[in-house]
């Protein structure tokens, strides 16, 4: 039985209850109790940039994490003494995918493509290029045009498409191919000496799938859309990784399984000793 836990969670609609489903009243208090235990190293894993993560910590009274993987996996920060320290080792690990090119070089490659509208500067980083794209644009045609230009420069990139439903516009992030939540987590696990058996990740959406379909023990909170649940189960089964996926059902400590209640339920599934820790027996166990 491991005496420490790497607790990793997505923020929007996983820890942060900003979806249409209800949050159980006491769920975040339990989560905070778990996160604050000395045995637990807390990691936030988010598409948000650092300032927006800090905003969420304030707005939703979230516990301060020990680490943050931000900007869809393109940046890693250690939080210590109230300061955020960027991990240069992680930047080095992903930079080679772009063969010495950074944001401005890649941006120049696409400057004549009228369908791409650059997002605001606070949404860009050295290894993340973010555009708005009209929902009417044929994504496949646009992506193959861009792909060709990247290949000519020996740039290995991932295209992450999503939709801002409030603004009714498409979003496109272009990232180094190894910069995703899964690789960033595996990098952090090896840096801190954690293994699959004492690491748990929680998420809720399509951009969490690379972690759901991996050997990393993963929780899908109950409010995860059904198609994401089905895909995570199906793809994990094909790869023989079904035991590393848990879908929160509700019922844990009388809570509904949404958001942080789901995180706790999943952590308890993979790591039953947290129940003793939460009930205050942790000192007897150590
Ligand atoms: Mg999310």
Image (tube, grey):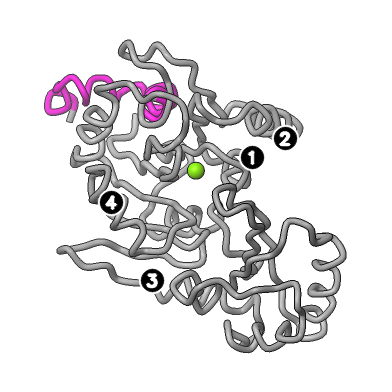
Q: Nearer the viewer, mark 1 or mark 4?
A: 4
Pick whichever of labels 1 and 3 is earlier in the sequence: 3
Based on the displayed image, in which of its 4 quarters is residue 242 positioned?
Answer: top right
Where in the figure is residue 97, as x and y percent of width and height? 65, 75
Measured Cα–Cα span from mark 1 to mark 3: 26 Å
Question: Foreground: 31 or 169?
Answer: 169
Q: Classify mark 4: helix, strand or loop.
A: loop
**Upstream in the sequence, badge 2 or badge 1?**
1
At horizontal 27% and vertical 43% (from top left) the residue drawn is 60
| Image quadrant in which the C terminus is located | top left
Q: Earlier in the sequence, mark 3 or mark 4?
A: 4
- Judged by its main secondary structure, the magenta piece is helix
How far apart marks 2 and 1 lie (CA) works out to 6 Å
Distance between the alpha carbons at the discs numbered 1 and 4: 24 Å
Q: CA distance from mark 3 to mark 4?
A: 15 Å
Quickly name the residue at label 3. 87
Tell me whether circle 2 and circle 1 mark residues in contact (CB < 8 Å): yes
Tell me the quarter of the image containing the N terminus: top left
Q: Which residue is mark 2?
A: 235
Q: Which residue is mark 1?
A: 213
Residue to which mark 4 is pinned: 65
SS under mark 2: helix
Point 35% across, 72% down: residue: 86
Span of residues in magenta: 262-285
Dot 2 or dot 3: first in sequence order is 3
Q: Is residue 206 left or right of residue 254?
A: right
**Residue depicted at 42% across the width and 26% down the height:** 262
Farthest-out residue, front = 167
């Amino acid at each position: 039985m491991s005496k420490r836990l790497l607790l990793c969670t997505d923020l929007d609609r996983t820890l942060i209850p900003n979806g249409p489903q209800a949050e159980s009243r006491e769920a975040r208090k339990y989560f905070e109790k778990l996160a604050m235990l000395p045995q637990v190293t807390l990691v936030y894993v988010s598409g948000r940039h650092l300032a927006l993560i800090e905003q969420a910590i304030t707005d939703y009274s979230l516990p301060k994490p020990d680490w943050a993987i931000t900007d869809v996996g393109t940046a890693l920060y250690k939080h210590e003494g109230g300061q955020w320290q960027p991990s240069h080792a992680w930047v080095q690990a992903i930079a080679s995918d772009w063969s010495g090119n950074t944001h401005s070089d890649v941006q120049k490659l696409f400057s004549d493509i009228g369908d791409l509208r650059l997002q605001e500067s606070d949404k860009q980083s050295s290894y993340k290029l973010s555009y708005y794209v009209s929902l009417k644009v044929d994504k496949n045609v646009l992506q193959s045009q861009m792909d060709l230009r990247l290949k000519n420069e020996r740039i290995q990139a991932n295209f992450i498409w999503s939709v801002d439903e409030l603004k009714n516009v498409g979003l496109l992030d272009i990232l180094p191919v190894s910069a995703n939540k899964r690789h960033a987590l595996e990098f952090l696990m090896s840096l801190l000496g954690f293994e699959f058996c004492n690491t748990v990740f929680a998420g809720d959406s399509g951009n969490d799938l690379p972690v759901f379909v991996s050997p990393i023990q993963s929780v899908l909170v109950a409010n995860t859309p059904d198609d994401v649940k089905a895909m995570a189960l199906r793809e994990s089964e094909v790869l023989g990784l079904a035991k590393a996926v848990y879908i929160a059902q509700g019922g844990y400590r009388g809570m509904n399984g949404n958001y942080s209640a789901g995180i706790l339920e999943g952590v308890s599934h993979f790591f039953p000793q947290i129940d003793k820790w939460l009930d205050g027996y942790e000192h007897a166990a150590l």
